[in-house]
Image: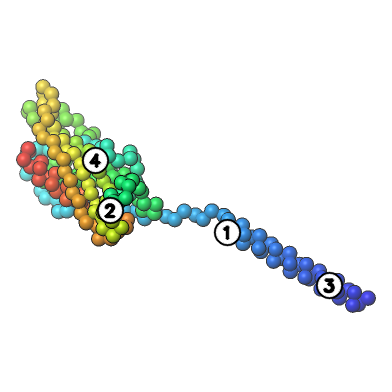
Amino acid sequence: MIATQGKQHIMKKNIAIKAGLFVAAVLLSACSVLPKPPATATLYDLGPAIGKPVDLPVGKRPVMVAAISGQGLMPGSTAMLYRFVDVDQQLRAYQEARWSRPIEQLFGLQLRQKLEQGRPILDTEFSLSRMRAGDQYPLVLRVDIENFEQIFQNPQDSKGVVQLRATLIEPGVGGDKLLAQRTFVSAIDASEANAAGGAKALAEASRTLAVEIDSWLRHYE
């Protein structure tokens, strides 16, 4: 009788152990099939403009910078784009790297920071008619970004390429006058064949174009 009770106790204990192992196995299996939380994307921006603010001459003609458009971009997107020119020219986006804001906003901020170092800069909420001095209105600068991407010549070598079109308009009592229009392009070698290298090259390319637009404007002010 005692031996029988001992065997029953051992059997119950073994069953409990097996049940525990089964439950643990089920839990581990469930954990393995649950979706993993998405990795947090690294955010990049274009950094500050080059140079330091200066006191502007009294009477310097102001420039209104219209909202930057991105005809060559996905509207409102923060994707970092790249392509391989020697493969299929397909435009791709990095999965774990993004811009902190849409490029139109980032470049617009950088451009304004650069331009305001040499002249008063107005945003679109200002009224041109109220800002008129005699028959002279502030100039209006429009910029459209046509290309903003990392281009790989091969898996090891790439460039940050920025292309944009700038249009300078002089409003007048009798209508607007097109003063000038120019396409700007900058291509900077990336130090690394990855998103970080591309972001750095694109930031430098955009700073270069901001400086070139600043110099270009001086011919018409």
Could you tell me which residue is drawn at 65 percent across and 63 percent down?
A: 25
Looking at the picture, how far across and down is residue 134, in whole percent?
7, 28
Could you tell me which residue is drawn at 32 percent across and 47 percent down?
A: 88
Q: Can I make out residue 120 in this image? A: yes
Q: In the depicted view, which residue is nearer to us: 43 or 200?
A: 200
Could you tell me which residue is drawn at 16 percent across and 50 percent down?
A: 208
Q: Amino acid at mark 3?
A: His
| Mark 1 or 3, nearer chain start | 3
Direction front: furthest residue: 87
Please state which of the two labelled residues, at mark 2 or mark 3, is closer to the viewer.
2
Mark seen at residue 32: 1
Looking at the picture, how far across and down is residue 167, in whole percent?
16, 35
Q: Rate crowding at label 2 as few (under 14), some (14 to 19) or many (20 or more) other CA atoms within 10 Å.
A: many
Q: Amino acid at mark 1?
A: Ser
Separation (CA) of disc 4 from disc 2? 18 Å
Q: Which residue is mark 2?
A: 152
Residue 22 position (above or below residue 97): below
Separation (CA) of disc 4 from disc 3? 79 Å
How many numbered circles are shown?
4
Mark 4 touching mark 2, by CB under 8 A?
no
Mark seen at residue 146: 4
